[in-house]
Image (cartoon, rainbow, N blue to C red):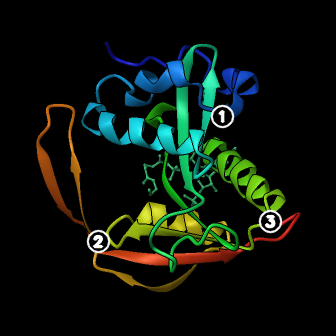
Amino acid sequence: MLFSPGLNTQKNLSKIEIRHLREKELPALEWEGEYIHFRPMFERAYRRVETHEAVIWVAALQDTLIGQVFVQLRSGRNELVDGHTRAYLYAIRVREAYRNFGLGSRLMYVTENDLIWRGYRYSTLNVARDNLSGLRFYERHGYKIVGQDDGRWSYTDHLGQTHLVHEPAYRMEKELKLGR
Ligand SMILES: CC(C)(COP(=O)(O)OP(=O)(O)OC[C@H]1O[C@@H](n2cnc3c(N)ncnc32)[C@H](O)[C@@H]1OP(=O)(O)O)[C@@H](O)C(=O)NCCC(=O)NCCS
């Protein structure tokens, strides 16, 4: 099924709710199959939410998820996320039909303010070097390039197959302050 944003995207924007993902909505993160290969990763991320190691924010328009952002609060990589000072943002996505209306910015605002209230001082992220619009988006939100990342990672898909990814990236960081 193709996702249809409805006749009046602009009008729909006022009905969007930004909130935590609910467990029963895990399949909705796959959108219409576009991210089905990340199913095991989504499930693992949700288990980390339950142990307070991660947060998943979504933008919901009635029953449809149109935006998502994952935050790691703890991990084994202290340079990215250390459990109290530094948190790691990844996979911020807005459905194509809803881009360029400020939704990505709203997701960032909610995510960063939540981190501030949790006591975090920095947020870090990686963005693929060839993702120029993503890079511009983060720079506009105050992120600065602080290094490079080889960008080698792997994931196991919903069929149990392992995929190796090589996506050279910039490491970006922002000091979090109330009111930005
Ligand atoms: C990056 C991404 C999340 C941004 O989401 P978005 O909802 O389009 O974000 P915004 O609308 O807040 O900002 C996007 C642009 O629209 C502009 N904009 C914001 N509100 C606007 C409005 N009301 N009217 C017109 N333009 C607007 C912003 O100035 C911004 O311009 P920029 O690209 O020059 O920075 C989205 O493009 C996406 O999902 N991309 C694919 C996944 C990805 O690359 N993620 C990042 C790396 S993981």
Residue 6 at x, y percent in the picture = 54, 14
Judge left or right: residue 82 versus residue 85.
left
Residue 94, visible in the rendered structure = no
For the residue pair 167 and 6, the one nearer the viewer reads as 167
Residue 144, visible in the rendered structure = yes
Residue 37 at x, y percent in the picture = 24, 36
Position of residue 52 relative to residue 35, above or below, is: below
For marks 3 and 1, the one nearer the N-term is: 1
| Residue at horizontal 44 percent and vertical 36 percent from the top | 96
Q: Are there few (<14), some (14-19), or many (20+) residues within 10 Å of tag 3?
A: some
| Residue at horizontal 48 percent and vertical 39 percent from the top | 47
Q: Quadrant of the N terminus?
A: top left
Q: Secondary structure at mark 3?
A: loop
Q: Secondary structure at mark 2?
A: loop
Choose mark 3 or mark 1, whichever is in front.
3
Q: Are there few (<14), some (14-19), or many (20+) residues within 10 Å of tag 2?
A: some
Residue 20: which disc? 1
Residue 165 at x, y percent in the picture = 19, 60
| Residue at horizontal 77 percent and vertical 52 percent from the top | 114
Q: Which residue is mark 2?
A: 151
